[in-house]
Image (cartoon, rainbow, N blue to C red):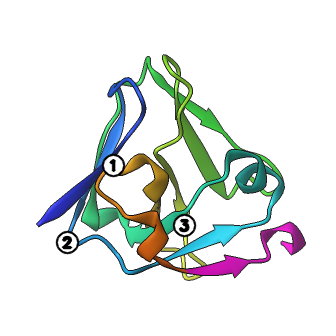
Amino acid sequence: MSYRSTCHCGTISATVSGDLPAEAMTCNCSICRRKGTVLHFVSSDEAALDAPTDKLGDYTFNKDAIHHHFCMVCGCTPFATGTDPQGNEMVAVNLRCVPECDLDQLKLTTVDGASF
């Protein structure tokens, strides 16, 4: 089983191995608050990114630890990439970009990213 997070126009996506999660997180950092993302983190081994380099935007800020990727055609942000505190590569999947994800059924945890 797998699920796919895509931008609005379908140009960039992340396909994740496994079932849709029952839990996710929201973050109050300055960019997540503005984008309204609902995130689920997976190891980079679990996600296949399909993103032509000429259509993939990349935005970093603060410590430049997370690459907030966006589609340069439609502007949507289906995923971000970075490393966890142990140095493992990870993908933050924006579940708002997964059509079959029932956001109302997710158990949400809020992370105080504004304090990082």
Position above or below: 110 against 34: below
Question: Magenta residues?
Answer: 108-116
Q: CA distance from mark 3 to mark 2?
A: 20 Å
Residue drawn 39% across the image and 70% down it: 42
Q: Nearer the viewer, mark 3 or mark 2?
A: 2
Q: Earlier in the sequence, mark 2 or mark 1?
A: 2
Disc 2 target residue: 18
- Looking at the rendered structure, the secondary structure element under dot 2 is loop
Does the stretch in magenta take in 45? no
Give x and y (percent) for residue 105.
Answer: 42, 75
Q: CA distance from mark 1 to mark 3?
A: 26 Å
Q: Amino acid at mark 1?
A: Pro
Quarter of the image for residue 23 reads: bottom left
Q: Amino acid at mark 2?
A: Gly
- Looking at the rendered structure, the secondary structure element under dot 3 is strand
Residue drawn 53% across the image and 33% down it: 76
Does the stretch in magenta take in 112? yes
Q: Nearer the viewer, mark 2 or mark 1?
A: 1
Give x and y (percent) for residue 90.
Answer: 45, 65
* Neighbourhood count class around disc 2 (C-alpha, 10 Å): few under 14, some 14–19, many 20 upward: few
Quarter of the image for residue 20 reads: bottom left
